[in-house]
Image (cartoon, rainbow, N blue to C red):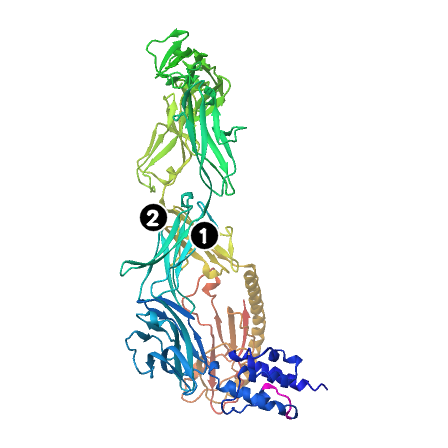
Amino acid sequence: MDSRRPALRFCKALNRLLLSRPRVQSLCAQCRLFPAFHAPSCLSCLPSAGLGPTSRAPETTWSSVGLPPRHSTMHLLGPLLLLLEYLAFSDSAQWTFEHPKILYAWDGACVWIPCHYRILNMHLLDNLTVYHNYKYDNSTKSYQGTILYTNLKIGDVPRRPGRVQFLGNNRYNCTLLINPVKVNDSGQLGLRMMSRESKWMEPIGLNISETAPPPHIELPPDIRELRDVTVTCSLNFACFEYQVHLQWSLEEPAVTSTSLSTKTVSTQSTLTFQPQWTHHGKNLTCQLWDPTQQQLLSEETVWLDVKHAPKLKIQVSPREATVTEGESVTMTCQVVSSNPRHQNVSWLRDGALLVGEETPTLTLPEVTRKMSGQYQCKAHNDVGSEKSEAVDLQVHHAPEPSRVQIFSSPTKEGNKVELTCISLANPPPTNYTWYYNGLEMPGKTDRTFQIPEVLLSHAGAYSCLAENNLGPGQVGQEADLEVQYPPKEVTTVIRNPTPIREGDSVILSCTYNSSNPRVTRYKWDHLGFQDQLSSAVLTIQKVAWDTGPVKCAACNRWCLWSPPVNLDVQYAPKDVSVQVTPRNEIRSGLSVFLQCDFLSSRPTDVHFFWKKNGIFLEEGKKLSFDAISPEDAGVYHCLVNNSIGQTSSKAWDLQVLYAPRSLHVSISPKDRVVEGKKAVLTCESDANPPTSHYAWFDWNNQDLRHYDQTLRLDPVTLQHSGAYWCQGTNRLGRGQSPPTTLTVYYSSATIIRRVALGVGFCLAIFLLAIWGVKLQRSWKRIQRQQGLQESSSGQSFFVRNVKARRIPQAEAPHSLGCYNPVMEDAVSYAALRFPLGEIDAPRPGDAGPSEMRGLSPNRDDTVTYSVVQKRHADDYENVTPEVLEDEGIHYSEMVHFGFGERPLAQEGVEYVTLKQ
């Protein structure tokens, strides 16, 4: 294991601790290179750095810095304790300051010292003392010097006015103001600052002069003509209590700014301008002014070096640069200014370079009129090239052969024409002579003359002659004046035989008398549209009835229109319409008028006809109804004709409004309605507008409360038979139908059931007759037996009528006969018999023997009581009985009493029911 590794770890930890202290970071290069040395060598630089012990070192936890084990670090403990003691009690690690290192001013001004401080342990400043040119006294362990300001309790004592003022606070601001400042204030200021646990002396330099120092002007390295240049004038001085102003010698706007911070204290003025070549070699001055006293304090001057192209000027001989043709001219190019120096000179005439002329002097020995023009010289340097101002060389000569310029030719007849005589001469011509077709035009002596309205007679050849003070010129080439005009006497001609009817083809032609230049095209105007053709003939296929006037134009450069021609197209009447009065709804009984109108007709002689539903009605323009009825409603047409044709109007549907009428009830099915099926009753009516509401009533005029047009009976019964009627309503009124009888017939099932009932009834009668014969014989036999038993005793009897209900066999098992609960239409027959002896003995006290003797011994004591029940009324058609009939069975019972004991007799009731 390497023995240096523990020491290396210790040096790394120590290095981190040292680097956290600002004043210890530069202890020695050997400590920063500790990986290459043993730990003792790392600490050997501490005494040389002045890190000696001053008091007790605070206790330190070595494990926090990652030190090696105890057996390998004991020899490092002493130097380490010295280092930690220095770091713990060193004030430099607790105070930090920000302020300018040195400040400048002059006698009578003021010094504003911006200052910020910070105590790392966040303690507050307790007192402050400002020393001038302080020194540290080792014997007294204190600072000596002139005290300019002291404040023992900053937090409590308010600021005191004086030459030196503390403008800060006890937390972070240590700004000072010295007003006024004196020359002997130059030197070192010391700010002795103390807090509860630490103290510090901070130096600040002052440079105070007797007079204000000059400002400093800063110029860019390269200044060129007409390029923006920014120049600054600055002064290392600023104080709120003493205002100063920086002023430039150039009359240009400048921007002044003041900086008072812990970094810089200055006053600066910025000037931005475009230098001219005339600024080259001139002085630029910045002056420091006291605006309060209005006096100059100091100034600074610099020389401007403006780079610019050569500035040139031409001198000419003769000076006026005006010569007569054949004389000589000399021109010299002078360089007024050039920075840097120019290189060569060239010459230009009317902007074109004169080849071979590269000397400062240009000589023209014999000038001609062609040498007239604008002359310039040109030179260049490293900045660029420049031209001089132009010199206009005028060469005088007599007028050249003249020519005529016509504005404009060819020209249109009636326009204004201007003729100008052009002749080159110097000086310009002063007199002109005009010629027309070779003849002099008297009175025309100006350079131009005008013809206000040119005519065909003005056409011809024109020429002129010019002269100046050097003499007349020559007549040049003639100019021809051409007078043009549009076609004349343009006419539109109809080639069709008249009259023209609608739908015919029409041919028209366009003619004219003369034209210059010749006619090249034609224009036609018809139906509001214009067509352009190369032919003079226009064909209109199927001419319309409303075709308006037609006109044409013959065109060369200009067009001339002919007068419009009316085609006079004949046609049948147009836009036939029917006008109805009144215009709103028409009700039955009102007076109504129909009138036939049309828009136009050619010829205008017309006739009117009326049709109703396609059938001729009558002739005339108007159709009237005094009291219109629903039968008058229909589709009406109005027809108007003339000699060309006939036109019909649009169909007019005449609607007559009326209340419901002709109401009647229709029954479906129509042949017969059978019970159990469906029957539909429909209320049919005639109404306009259609019937909107219906009501139904029966044969008793009872409202069925059914409001549809149809009344459905599903299924229909015999009880539905009867008379029905309906009522219809619209917004104009109400109508009622007559009653209609609905007869419901039996269904085949009902008929079969009733036939079966009749057959059953006949069969029952037959069986009842047979049984009655048997019953009668049995009854007589029983009577004879009872007569024998009661012959010796007195006899009496009474008859009791009993009304009994029909009892089914299930309730009376001892009854004879049958009962059908379904069949209600029965014929009942009963026979009651009393068995008596052959001879009844009379009772004492009764009637005489004669009465008794009157009785036949062979008489039949049977009482027969029969009820034939009537048919119900509802068996026929659909009639409901008002009173229910008695459906009971009536019979009589005769009880016979004799003398003595009556023998028990059989009192049975036998009956037979026959169902029909």
Q: Residue at horizontal 32%, vertical 61%?
A: 244
Judge from the rendering whether residue 107 lies leftward or rightward of residue 769; answer left or right. Answer: left
Q: Which residues are magenta?
A: 65-70
Q: Helix or strand or loop: what does disc 2 sit on?
A: loop
Q: Which sits in the foreground, 93 or 486?
A: 93
Residue marked by disc 2: 732
Q: Residues within 10 Å of mark 2 (few under 14, many from 20)?
A: some
Spatial separation of the CA atoms under disc 2 and disc 1: 22 Å
Q: Which quadrant does the N terminus fall into?
A: bottom right
Q: Which sits in the foreground, 707 or 443?
A: 443
Q: Quadrant of residue 388?
A: top left
Residue marked by disc 1: 682
Please name the amino acid that badge 1 sits on: Thr
Please name the amino acid that badge 2 sits on: Leu
| Picture coordinates of residue 209, whole percent (x, y) | 36, 66
In this rendering, the answer to whether 678 lies above or below 469 is: below
